[in-house]
Image (cartoon, rainbow, N blue to C red):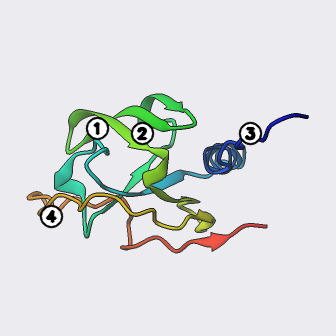
Amino acid sequence: MTGATEAASTKPYLIRAIYEWCSDNGLTPYLAVRVDGQTSVPTAYVKDGEIVLNLGAEAVRNLHMGNDIISCGGRFGGAPHDLVIPVAAVIGIFARENGQGLAFEAQPGPTPPETNPPADGGESGTPHGRPHLRVVK
């Protein structure tokens, strides 16, 4: 083999693998995201610069998990939103029911936008606060 080529990141493949594992086992896949200027999510649901999204089949439509971008449509407070999440912004994917999944190191990016909690007292994505992530081997 001549010349060295840079291998693609394993991160998008691992995200898709945990998503598929959740789906195959009847679990709800949740995606933890560090929100930055490249992330398109409803800012009213961002807390401390992060958002946790339910990626279950009942919660999103037109889910596309590419190597650079994860996109889908979802509803927040009854209003439809198109979501665009750079894979670099993903800090974890896990099963809501048991917390099993993968956490990723946060990659530096632009400062997240200032946000306020939802006016209707809605959740930020998890029923009991921050997710509990465990490394799955």
Q: Are marks 3 and 4 in contact (CB under 8 Å)?
A: no
Instruction: Pick out the residue farthest to the top.
Output: 62
- The mark nearer the N terminus, 1 or 4, is 1
Residue at image point 14% right, 58% down: 118
Q: CA distance from mark 2 to mark 3?
A: 39 Å
**Label 1 environment density (alpha carbons within 10 Å; few <14, some 14–19, many ≥20):** some
> Is 38 placed left or right of 78 in the picture?
right
Callout 2: SS: loop
Q: Amino acid at mark 1?
A: Arg
For the residue carrying disc 3, how many other residues have a C-alpha within 10 Å: few (<14), some (14-19), or many (20+)?
few
Label 1, label 4: how far apart the Cα atoms are:
16 Å
Q: Which mark is residue 59?
A: 2
The answer to whether the residues at label 2 and label 1 have Cβ atoms under 8 Å apart is yes
Q: Is residue 128 above or below residue 44?
A: below
Q: Earlier in the sequence, mark 2 or mark 3?
A: 3
> What residue sits right under mark 3 in the picture?
5
Q: Earlier in the sequence, mark 2 or mark 1?
A: 2
Q: What residue is shown with label 4?
A: 117
CA–CA distance in space, label 2 to label 4: 21 Å
Task: Estimate the x, y position of residue 20 in percent, counting from the top left.
Answer: 68, 42
Q: Amino acid at mark 3?
A: Thr
Q: Quadrant of residue 126?
A: bottom left
